Image (cartoon, helix red, strand yellow):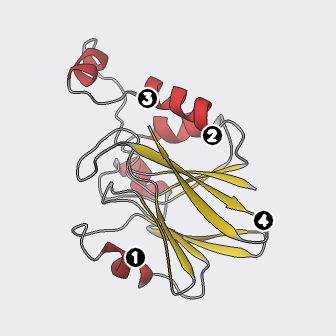
Amino acid sequence: MKIGVLSDTHLAVPTGRFHAVTQKIRNKRTIEDLHEIVQQHLSDVELILHAGDFVEEAVFEMLQKFAPVKAVRGNMDHIAIQNRFPTCRIVEVNDFKIGLTHGDGPPQGIVERVKQHFHDVDAIVFGHSHQPLNEKHDGILFFNPGSPTDRIFAPYTSIGMLEVSDTITGRLIKL
């Protein structure tokens, strides 16, 4: 099973007629850009995980057009997202348990902090730092897809893919 993984999309619904132009000038992607990215890289997934900081519900609604979405809220999400999603959850796929959370604090030490939220999981998907990560520690896959829209703290934008069969593996997709 292929699972698309995103976090830190940080996209707001356009509120003025110059919003898209302003986003382009700031080198920040728009929701239309994200739609194209998902269509190009994640069109064959059966599930999408989002590790928070959608910012607006429109991003969630757009992602649902591609596959069912399991998500958590992030620290920058609008109140509607805050009320809709938990801070942590476990998603079961086949016989694997995937912990899903946003994360908090500085990038340094984030793996240790997200690990504290879960016990007996096979993978932990998180975001917050915008730094892509695909590493195993003590038999647990720690996977941060990075951000598809913002390079703060990271050299490039990215999304991710988990593949679940008799194992669970991650792949980062540099945009």
- Up/down of 78 relative to 15, above or below: below
Which of disc 2 and disc 3 is earlier in sequence?
Answer: 3
Please tell me which residue is depicted at 56% across the width and 35% down the height of the picture. Answer: 38
Q: Which residue is mark 2?
A: 42
The numbered dot on residue 165 is 4
Mark 4 surroundings within 10 Å by alpha-carbon count, few (fewer than 14), some (14 through 19), many (20 or more): few
* Residue at (29% x, 68% y) in the render: 104
Read off the residue under disc 1: 114
Q: Residue at x 34, y 34 (%)?
A: 12
Residue 50 horizontal/vertical position (percent): 51, 53
Structural distance between the alpha carbons of marks 3 and 4: 31 Å
Element assignment for label 4: loop
> Which one is nearer the viewer's eye here, 170 or 110?
170
Q: Secondary structure at mark 3?
A: helix
Query: Looking at the image, do the residues carrying marks 3 and 1 touch, with CB atoms under 8 Å apart?
Result: no
Give the left or right position of residue 85, taking residue 55 as reference. Answer: right
Q: Quadrant of the N terminus?
A: bottom right
Q: Earlier in the sequence, mark 3 or mark 4?
A: 3
Name above or below for residue 87 compared with residue 59.
below
Foreground: disc 4 or disc 1 = 4
User: For the residues carrying marks 3 and 4, which lies nearer the camera in this image?
Assistant: 4
